[in-house]
Amino acid sequence: MQRNSQHPAAARHRTWPGRLRFGGHAVPRFIRVEAIPEVQGQLIPSMLIPSMLIPSMLIMAMLSMTVATARCDEIAVLAGEYHEHPLSEDQLQHWSMQPVRTVTPPDVRDRQFVRTPVDQFIQSRLEERGLGLQPPATRSVLRRRAALMLTGLLPGVSDHEAAGPPAEFSDEVQQLLQQPAYGERWAQHWLDLARFAETDGYEHDKQRGEAWQYRDWVIRALNRDLGYDQFIRMQIAGDLLSDNPEDAVATHFCVAGPDMPDINLQEERRHTLLNEMTATVGEVLLGLQLGCAQCHDHKYDPISQADFYRLRAVFEPAVTVRKNVSVTRLDSKQSGELISRVMLRGDFRRPGPAVQPAPLRCISSGEDPPLFDRPALARWLSSPRNPLTARVIVNRIWQQHFGRGLCEEPSDLGVMGFEPSHPDLLDWLSGWFMENDWSLKRLHVLLLDSGVWQQRSLLPESASTAAKIAWESALQRDRDLSLLSRFPRRRLDGEVIRDALLQVSGLLNQERGGPGVFAPLPPEIRATLLKNQWNETTDPAEQNRRSIYVFARRNLRYPIFEAFDRPSANLSCSRRSVSVTAPQSLYLLNSAFSGRIAKELAILIQAESTLPLEQVDAAFQRILRRRPEATEQADAAEFLLQSDENGLASLCLVLINTSEFIYLD
């Protein structure tokens, strides 16, 4: 579908009573424009007409027209100003709107590093380009990779340096998935999508006392491997589908975004909340940019404005607002009949035609119940017949393991999103996922057991001539790694870096759950906050809890998180930015936090040995999870011999600033 870039030479109008006077001209409040495709048939405020590039002579001609005045008492007239067009067959042909296909893994010529059906899809595409999978990384690299990906913590110290995964690697993966740390790590990925914070945002950024309960619910759900279908049902209608009071907390997902409880127009606040949660449900669970349809029919995807407000109508009975009170979950007890309407041009003061709750037409199976409420929506979202839900989540899991999704825009699988790099693999994974009880843990095992995930990311110096030729060929023919001809190296998130630093220094407090803790802030940052917005937790041990438990203030990202690209919680984030900036190095090298970590680590090592060579070996093992090479050991030991009593702390500070520590190989 393409934009029509030609502007009309004239615009037709229709006469309604009422006009304003401006100088000697009659100035309409609203003008109905018929000949501009983007706004055809809409009532447009006159002050916006110049911004639509209408020729100036046409504007002057319009000024003398007698046109519609959009007064509140003309709702009946305005109700006829929105017309929903039926969807054409062409609009429904986009790949993401089609049912998930049954796909057979392709045959491949070279099966040397093929371990799972996933590898067959990747290897097949590589062979088309004259490439193949790389050999597996060393055992220590794979153990570190798996531990950091699944738990956000470093693995135990190991002496294994042999090439390839150990025979018990699959067992190690299973053990990692059974650790409570798994839920704490993967909850952060979901909280990014849910735009989670423990405050309202905006000017006053007031605290939401119960928000942490939702964070803990997500962690528990992931740790017990709650099926993804059930996981999303609880977040849409847990208060109505479960007798467990804790599941009502899950509906905080819908209202987790920013809010302004003190706004004077509470009707506007409610309208904004409903629009924002509807857009988020579409973006996060369906991978569609529904928010684009709150003011007009979607320009590209087959989603009308009425589609948006029919989906929004599902939530309307569940949103109750009171001034100066945060909304922390959906309301299951609201009484009274509500009439839901299309809001013309997205304006809450301009209600248009009435609509009934219903799913999106473009992906509806036609078998939906006549009463489409929140439980029905939850079941529709998690139905195997829904073509988008499984595709969206397996793409998100793939993205976290490989740095980019099979679809590069994880929250936009619509017309304007990228085509999947491996469409057959995406559908195979989606079908496999649903057949395996929507289990996220089983999906992790499948991916981590694959040869494509276990590939090396760097070519060792000892590689053979043939391996070097194959590596150079991969660099040339797969520059952007879209074909996954090697494992993609990438930087760790700020939360993982902080947790790993606390872990290696022996300071990490692994207590779980409860309200967010207020870790120390630099005085210059605290000075920017209002009174009592960051009352530092007095117990030093509590300050050292995992990053998932650091208080999430919407208007302030904790310094190390901000430096390493933690997203704003004002919008759903499907893919974090990954930057390389000077403040990152400055923080790790000069901050009081890094200095404390280095000193505590030096104390631990000195308690074990006073010999420089042994201290160097211990520092490398603790921080980098490997033994130093001979030249590294000699240079570091010489540095310690020539340094004062702070030499070991300085060495530790250098090691936590290495790329090897903050990157995933």
Image (cartoon, grey):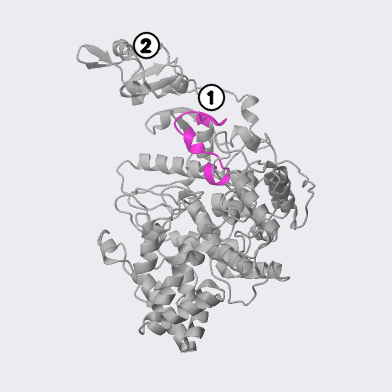
Q: Is residue 553 visible?
A: no
- Name the residue rendered at 36%, 85% in the picture: 645
- Amino acid type of the residue tagged 2 in the rendering: Thr
Which of disc 1 and disc 2 is earlier in sequence? 1
Mark 1 lies on a secondary structure that is: loop
Residue 380 position within the rendered picture, expressed as x and y whole percent measured from the top left:
63, 43
> Is 347 left, or right, of 293 in this rendering?
left
Q: How crowded is mark 2: few (under 14 residues within 10 Å), some or many (20 or more)?
A: few
- The mark found on residue 399 in the picture is none
- The mark found on residue 2 in the picture is 1
The answer to if 639 sits in the magenta stretch is: no
Quarter of the image that includes the C terminus: bottom right
Q: What stretch is highlighted in magenta?
A: 282-306
> Is 115 left, or right, of 141 in this rendering?
right
Q: Is the magenta stretch mostly helix, strand or loop?
A: loop
- The mark found on residue 15 in the picture is 2
Instruction: Count up the numbered dots.
Output: 2
- Name the residue rendered at 64%, 25% in the picture: 90
Residue 367 position within the rendered picture, expressed as x and y whole percent measured from the top left:
68, 36
Q: Is the residue 599 above or below the residue 202 in the image?
A: below
